[in-house]
Amino acid sequence: MLSQQTPLPKPNSGDPSPDDVSAGLATTSADSPSSLSTRRRNLLIFVVFTGVLIAADRASKLAALAAFGNGQSLVVIPGILECTLVWNRGAAFGLFEGAGPLFLAVALFVVGMALVYLLKSRQPRLLVALSLALIVAGAVGNAYDRLASGAVPDFLHLLFVEFPVFNLADCCLTMGEAGILLYILLGLRQPTRSKTNQD
């Protein structure tokens, strides 16, 4: 006798495919409470860190204005650092003098983009949040001086290298940009590392 084999039921066209299930799980994971908690934490860190840096920049500039007249100097570390008050009507480190309105627009754009990233990104990184806080604090700190005084007071002068006089906001901008660059470089290395592990 020949045994009859019961045919397997055909999958219903309405049933989700494995790819659809995986996509659904990925979406659920991205919007999970853990992801939302990380987003709120990084947003809070960004706001607090930005506020602290803006206050520190403002306090340092007021202290320099109270302590020095224009062009006066005070050696802080012989051969390394001195305080020399100069007024900068350009961008960071004295570049692009006379383009004040443009830099105000750039500062507003930077603040807006940072907030959009932190509010919309499903998995914002702490390194990016800290770097954006540095950039926003630097941009806002110098923008305030341009609005209030028409120029930015710079007072930090490196003695061991030929370099323009700068301030704390300039330092924030530079470190924030370095942090974003580091994040990009680390992101470029991850796919290479994953491919090596698969091989």
Image: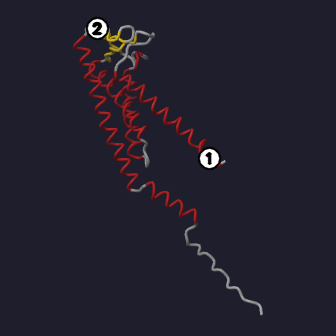
In the visual, does 20 lie left or right of 114?
right
- Return the residue nearer the eye: 14 or 188: 188
- Return the residue nearer the eye: 89 or 50: 50
User: Which of the 4 image quarters holds residue 90?
Assistant: top left
- Residue at label 1? 197
- Please tell me how many numbered marks the rendered image carries: 2
**Residue at the location (70% across, 85% down)?**
5
- Return the residue nearer the eye: 181 or 189: 189
Please tell me whether residue 29 is drawn above or below residue 175 in the rendered image.
below
Give the amino acid type for the residue marked by disc 1 in the picture.
Asn
**Residue at the location (43% across, 16% down)?**
95
Whole-angstrom CA distance, mark 1 to mark 2, is 60 Å
Q: Which sits earlier in the primary sequence, circle 1 or circle 2?
A: 2
Callout 2 crowding tier (Cα within 10 Å): few <14, some 14–19, many ≥20: few
| Callout 1 secondary element | helix
**Residue at the location (37% across, 21% down)?**
100
